[in-house]
Image: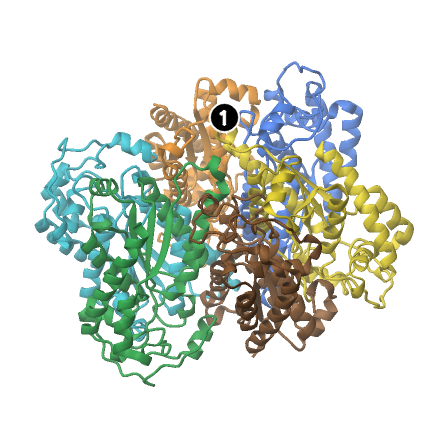
Chain colours: A cyan, B green, C brown, D yellow, E blue, F orange
Amino acid sequence: MQLHLSTWQEVEAYLANSKTIIIPVGSTEQHGPNGLIGTDAICPEVIAKGVGDETGIMVGPTLNVGIAQHHLGFAGSMAIRPSTMIQVVKDWTDSLRLHGFEKFYFLNGHGGNIATLMACFAELHGERSFAGAAGSNRPGIQCKLRNWWQGPKVNAISKKEYGAAEGSHATPSEVSVTYAAYPEAVKDVPMEPELAPRGGFTDAEDYRRTFPDGRIGSNPALASVEVGHQLIKAAVADTIDDLNQFKG
Amino acid sequence: MQLHLSTWQEVEAYLANSKTIIIPVGSTEQHGPNGLIGTDAICPEVIAKGVGDETGIMVGPTLNVGIAQHHLGFAGSMAIRPSTMIQVVKDWTDSLRLHGFEKFYFLNGHGGNIATLMACFAELHGERSFAGAAGSNRPGIQCKLRNWWQGPKVNAISKKEYGAAEGSHATPSEVSVTYAAYPEAVKDVPMEPELAPRGGFTDAEDYRRTFPDGRIGSNPALASVEVGHQLIKAAVADTIDDLNQFKG
Amino acid sequence: MQLHLSTWQEVEAYLANSKTIIIPVGSTEQHGPNGLIGTDAICPEVIAKGVGDETGIMVGPTLNVGIAQHHLGFAGSMAIRPSTMIQVVKDWTDSLRLHGFEKFYFLNGHGGNIATLMACFAELHGERSFAGAAGSNRPGIQCKLRNWWQGPKVNAISKKEYGAAEGSHATPSEVSVTYAAYPEAVKDVPMEPELAPRGGFTDAEDYRRTFPDGRIGSNPALASVEVGHQLIKAAVADTIDDLNQFKG
Amino acid sequence: MQLHLSTWQEVEAYLANSKTIIIPVGSTEQHGPNGLIGTDAICPEVIAKGVGDETGIMVGPTLNVGIAQHHLGFAGSMAIRPSTMIQVVKDWTDSLRLHGFEKFYFLNGHGGNIATLMACFAELHGERSFAGAAGSNRPGIQCKLRNWWQGPKVNAISKKEYGAAEGSHATPSEVSVTYAAYPEAVKDVPMEPELAPRGGFTDAEDYRRTFPDGRIGSNPALASVEVGHQLIKAAVADTIDDLNQFKG
Amino acid sequence: MQLHLSTWQEVEAYLANSKTIIIPVGSTEQHGPNGLIGTDAICPEVIAKGVGDETGIMVGPTLNVGIAQHHLGFAGSMAIRPSTMIQVVKDWTDSLRLHGFEKFYFLNGHGGNIATLMACFAELHGERSFAGAAGSNRPGIQCKLRNWWQGPKVNAISKKEYGAAEGSHATPSEVSVTYAAYPEAVKDVPMEPELAPRGGFTDAEDYRRTFPDGRIGSNPALASVEVGHQLIKAAVADTIDDLNQFKG
Amino acid sequence: MQLHLSTWQEVEAYLANSKTIIIPVGSTEQHGPNGLIGTDAICPEVIAKGVGDETGIMVGPTLNVGIAQHHLGFAGSMAIRPSTMIQVVKDWTDSLRLHGFEKFYFLNGHGGNIATLMACFAELHGERSFAGAAGSNRPGIQCKLRNWWQGPKVNAISKKEYGAAEGSHATPSEVSVTYAAYPEAVKDVPMEPELAPRGGFTDAEDYRRTFPDGRIGSNPALASVEVGHQLIKAAVADTIDDLNQFKG
């Protein structure tokens, strides 16, 4: 069930039986020579939709620009500051809590978001903690961060298909997912070198110097629509398993 | 051309010829008994895509939650605070300016966003004004806010098809656009009364009291996929006309 | 009745019968070669005082620096950022709500303030909307923004006296109002060209380039104390008409 | 010279010879049974005008709502938060620095403002200190806080006229100044007891409990237009003496 | 009693009998050629510990970086912005209020902190004042700022030992206190000139220009471990006297 | 070398050879029936001092209150909001960068700080990334977060001494470190049950309900001064190994 395609009465009916909502969180940032700038938003959005279709769990809007300051040296990359994300996540959850949502499942598509999302949760929970038991007039909430790629079924495919060429940014797995979702956007670009360098980074200038074409350790030329479909299916299944535990 | 489906090299190539980007701005809020909660995000997103496809102008990500505090009395509605939107729009444009974008065309889907978006522009321009000529190390930018429904071709259709039943919230025109975009989400819900009440509002409690099913002055039961297609086509044309002037 | 000239007991007595307060909102910015920098604060202050004197409605302090980043290229112009105005308007109304004021009538003197003031209202109303019905422990408020120049009686005079020379910034009408209020400040300065250019603008540098002496489309050399007195009288009457509707 | 009654060209001419501006800072808060709510704004405004008239030094707009949270238990009192004042003072001085003002003389009318104004100065100076010598592209500024009542000529009059009845809030001296400025607002209200209690306070509830009619230690029934005129004259002279040192 | 060396059950037991906590507030900033960068944090920390040991009153953590923008021209100096201190003090006291602490005694070691700490108190008290009696669900608090050097016993020693060589920054008294606390850190550095210059300052650049080695008016070469021990003893006694009044 | 015990000239000399500073980051929160509230600040402070003594690397002040909203249900616990920590870390590093520090090694004592510290780093690096290469006038910095307990030598001891009784909050290892540092604060308190429950948590109310005496999975009655000394020695060695890599 997708919030954007529902009426308010449908949401009201949903809330009579469930307090859970999935919120896809992505990023808008370079993904190397053949990866889409929207990769990290597209992946959780597509997978969340799959989960929602299969289980009937509500899927909210995608937070489509994330913590990506280190990619700002590449054209088209966008970022919000961590302090901005705290405000946004607060407003989104403040809204949804009003209606009765209490379990927020953030399906994440970007490693760079992890720390700040966890900081957001501390800020959200802290609001109630700082108010004290007496001062609090809303029920507590539960937040969970889940990266779409962290389940066993997804990992098995990535390992089998790409092995050491998976790398950690602009991976063939994530590029495959986007190709499956938008086959019209498949790009055929040679990689030079085949495997991108690995390493750490600080700011955008440092990142660009270390990873000249944007990839980290990966060879996304191996990406394909077919593997993308397998990965989506696997990620939907992995996520449903995890979500069932979260829903309790 | 869609930012989310491009690579950074493609964006770099685009910027050699154009400094313009369209940013759809929407909202996630109730739209009455048969209108989708995502209506105000879907409409500018679909129309911006049409403009991008036809003209090759870059279309950025959709700002999908907006200034909708007055709808928070209806399940599923989400809002960000105006002070949050200022931060978000600043981060988005700060990112895009780095790459050379200078002309920001915000295609808006929600009347409630207008004032705050204009305030965002004042904050953005002010950054450079407060820095003074000497202190400024980036070029000035241009921002334009355009509501997708304000062109002559769109108005002609709305008037002809819906006349007084158009109203001002949950209008048959906007519902039609979303039905054309997502025919699987068409809802068949009776309206009672046929025409919703009109009037002003302040906060969410006041809004809900005045407009019990969420509509203002409209009869969205008249919405149809067919008119939606006409409206999208008209809005694309209207927007291109306006955008040509903006691009100068 | 003026808040600044009242005692707290007098305000307490006033509140037994009325919940309404007028807050003049202005700006401190260049108004061309013969216009006063305080024009946009002086006009609503003088007119609000007239309304207060005639009707007994409470008039609060003037918010005398506004959203005027685009004028910062001219000596003496001052501005606050939109995000600052949100904080200020929140503090002012938070204070006044404590005492029982519920209807805030912002009499505005500067076009540049309009969007941000509306954003302030969304932020104010949102505070209660985000708190939900259960969480809210204060009554809702009503805010209205009114530009002093938008009534029919004022328009009739401006049109008759100045016609096409009225322009849109540093207008002979607003300059006349300030001359009537401060006849000692009347300036006799030739305008070159007689009618200033028209057009749009972004930041301070752009504004100054486009409008070299600060005026937009006007010839304020036509301003006079006499017309100023007529305009004040007309604006007081227009405002009272509108305020009577607002008070309900 | 008053900024509000000047044109931008006149300010430009002024800046060729002087970098100094006086900014009156006040408050809008109860001043006991016969004192005006605007007392703390009126006093520095009137005295600053006197200084400006006599010396030609520029006088800016009055910051008319201040740090007065402790008065919010009395109808009509208004306050801004310290964090808000920091933003406002930053915006005001950021604006004026652009034009070449470098010496900011804050003529204060409210004891409660002192600490926060000094904190504002630390924030302002800190902006340059944090930027480092290399990063700084504007000249340093000087800020001085001066309370209108702290000069020897004013003290002599207060002591002679009111002695122990001066107290520390709603003093006969400040009430006299406002009566001289607005003789139409003179109030004749009996004080009960004659001398108000003295003591400390924390928040608004504590203040109201300790000082039931708002006064601290004073008998403002002794205020008069005549003494007000003497005090204004004395304060203008005291301020000019101090300002001459500041201008260096 | 020190919070950092207590268990939560011990704090709970303490709160059954007392609502008071001492919070040392310092700074991390240059203190001339032989003074420690931690001087202003060390002094109140050591003295607060002495008070806590003697009286059993709870001593909280030390706020060890303060309002010291003017020292940023000297290596190792650190500062927080006033707006940051407001947030920190709010969070610290919000935490402690939850447990029942109501009387906050800030033992300060740095003159530059005074104004901003007072502004923090206005912000804290204001939170309750702005909420109104009805809206407030926590008891009021009391905050007191006390500089460790302001008591009579301390002053007698400083005057007797150092007289005119005390100066106002990097004083032999404060350096002595730190030498008594950390005798391993005693430095033997010649002062040139013996007495540092006096005067005012604005930002870091201005401070460094006026006070080339960081001292103001002092000769800290006179500092000694012995006088430090006397001063600590005196300051503990002075503080206990003052604290007894505060506890009421 | 400790910043607090150095003069500015000593820091200046240090910076001629090194750009590295260790900043201990802790928390002030309950640590069960026999653990000190200052545990998480004491541990990294003591270990950092050991590292500084052995290697000569500079050790800055301890950030002693952290992200601990979930402990606020226990008396004495303190917390700052994540958004506050972002401001504080920005101000601290902004200060130190001015002097030439470029490598910030945060030695952390509290798991709850990890996410927010990483978010702080993204905010810090982002400042430079958002400014672009042209706009940036300071060198990039490097930040590393290291938990004192994560090295192999520490783990070997914890495992050998405590095994399954180590748990994850109020562990015997961390309590031992504090006992070694402050033997006067050793507490002898029976644990009931011996091993605390394990699990997850959200806000303070949830935490207290799940972990009634504050511990998670641990038996800190096993803590001892002796093991504490071993752990400190091991942690100093582990940290030096890691720091040597970081210094590069």
Name the residue located 23 percent from the left edge and 66 percent from the top edge: B234
Front residue of this view, candidates B175 and C175: C175
The x and y percentages for residue D135 are 48, 30
The x and y percentages for residue E100 are 59, 55
Quadrant of residue B63 within the rendered picture: bottom left
Numbered disc total = 1
Front residue of this view, candidates E41 and F240: E41
The x and y percentages for residue A197 are 20, 31
The x and y percentages for residue F181 are 51, 32
F152 up-or-down from C26: above or below: above
Amino acid type at image mark 1: His
Q: Say whether residue F18 is visible.
A: yes
Q: Say whether residue E139 is visible.
A: no
Image mark 1: chain = F
Front residue of this view, candidates A223 and C69: C69
Point out the image quarter for the C terminus of chain F. top left
Front residue of this view, candidates D107 and B147: B147
User: Which residue extends farthest right?
Assistant: D160
The residue at which mark 1 appears reads as F99
A26 up-or-down from D131: above or below: below
- Label 1 crowd bin: few (<14), some (14–19), many (20+), radius 10 Å: many
C223 up-or-down from E80: above or below: below
Horizontal side of residue A157 vs B248, given as left or right: left
Which secondary structure lies at badge 1? helix
User: Which residue extends farthest bottom?
Assistant: B193
Horizontal side of residue C175 vs B152, given as left or right: right
Quadrant of residue A52 within the rendered picture: bottom left
